[in-house]
Image (cartoon, grey):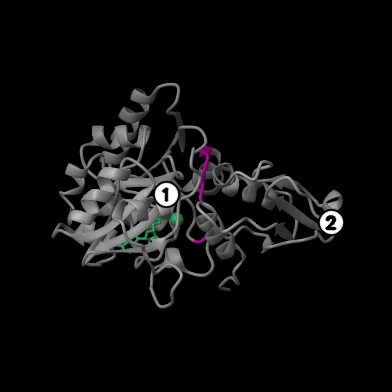
Amino acid sequence: MIVVDAQADPEGAVRAACQVLRSGEPVAIPTETVYGLAGDIHNERSIQRIFGIKARPNDNPLICHVASIEMAQNYVIFDDMALTLARSFWPGPLTLVLKRKLAGRAIEMAAASLPTLAVRVPQGFSRDLIESFGSGLAAPSANLSGRLSPTSANHVTTNLGNRMAMVLDGGPCTIGLESTVVEVSDGKCRLLRPGGLDVTAIQSVIGTSLVNVAAGQGFKSPGMMASHYAPSAKVRLDARQVFPGEALILFGPHSVAGAANAVAAFNLSEKGNLKEAASRLFDTMVQADASGAGTIAVTTVPCVGLGLAINDRLRRSAAPRPL
Ligand code: TXA
Ligand code: MG
């Protein structure tokens, strides 16, 4: 596996990545949210490799990353509300699930045969890469299915390094949480996954509130399974004290009883800033897990703004795990 420095030589990195992508092999790429495992969405082998490398169930659909609204229109149909959202928030941490246009076998596999396809225009380097590549890249987060999402090239190489050909190192992800996923149809906007774009920003643009499917029951999408983002250690939420043998993750200026005896202690944001906490969340979980503690105790993070997505990830990482 080769690690290419995409900060030192972005154009060279784009060239090298395009060559690997054309051969039908996925490449791990930095985006503003998390690192993605990107493959040519028109190539069946690429899509098979993505599912294989991640050990991802074939019925969990992938997001098609594009460079523009125009490129997205090759794959999906936009209604007025979807266009408004795309114009307001792309490039950025918003994924739109829209009616899929008829296309080949590879896209069918990426979409898990659903009548919809998720599309997103990412910011910065990854968008430049897609523009050079010239068509859509399917990219789930570059982690083993069900585990923590990677926010640095190092996370990717540690977990998937022996399974893939190339990782582009673009430094730490600025947002640090996956995109907010909404489905737009019949003039309604449904929240499928809270994420890096605050839902209140979406509501202010569409002028109505979102239907919160993410909080409901019965929607079959593995990204919304109760257990996800799982470190090896157990996770205990809303901790007010630390027990012997536990690692501690704080939020804000106040500590808790027993903190001095924690195996390792971290703070998502001493100032209590949710944006900072979001950007540090996964890396802090990785470090807390590496401490070897059997349990990671996490203090309360307020459930407002980006706190919604942070709490969603924390709850899933603490959920009972399948055997
Ligand atoms: O920020 C992100 O979204 C990152 C970066 C790499 O762009 N990608 C990412 O992909 O988080 P992934 O595959 O880890 O999560 C995508 C989520 C999953 O929960 C998947 O089930 C859902 O989006 N999804 C994808 N296509 C869908 C569709 N057609 N209908 C409903 N849900 C869909
Ligand atoms: Mg994921």
Q: Residue furthest bottom?
A: 218
Mark 1 / mark 2, whichever is N-terminal: 1
Residue 251 spot, x, y in % from top left: 67, 49
SS at mark 1 in the image: loop
Span colored in magenta: 146-153
Within 8 Å of ligand 2, the CB of disc 2?
A: no
Tell me the distance, in whole angstroms, between the alpha carbons under discs 1 and 2: 34 Å
Residue 59 in sight from this viewpoint: yes
**Neighbourhood count class around disc 2 (C-alpha, 10 Å): few under 14, some 14–19, many 20 upward:** few
Q: Amino acid at mark 1?
A: Leu
Quadrant of the image occupied by residue 241: bottom right
Count numbered badges in the picture.
Answer: 2
Q: Residue furthest left?
A: 102
Label 2, on which residue?
257
Label 1, on which residue?
197
Depth order, front residue of 24/266: 266
Q: Amino acid at mark 2?
A: Ala
Q: In the drawing, does residue 155 fall left or right of residue 88?
A: right
Label annotation for residue 165: none
Vertical placement of residue 19 versus 59, above or below: above
Residue drawn at the location 69% of the way across and 62% of the way down: 238
Q: Let me know if residue 148 is in the magenta part.
A: yes
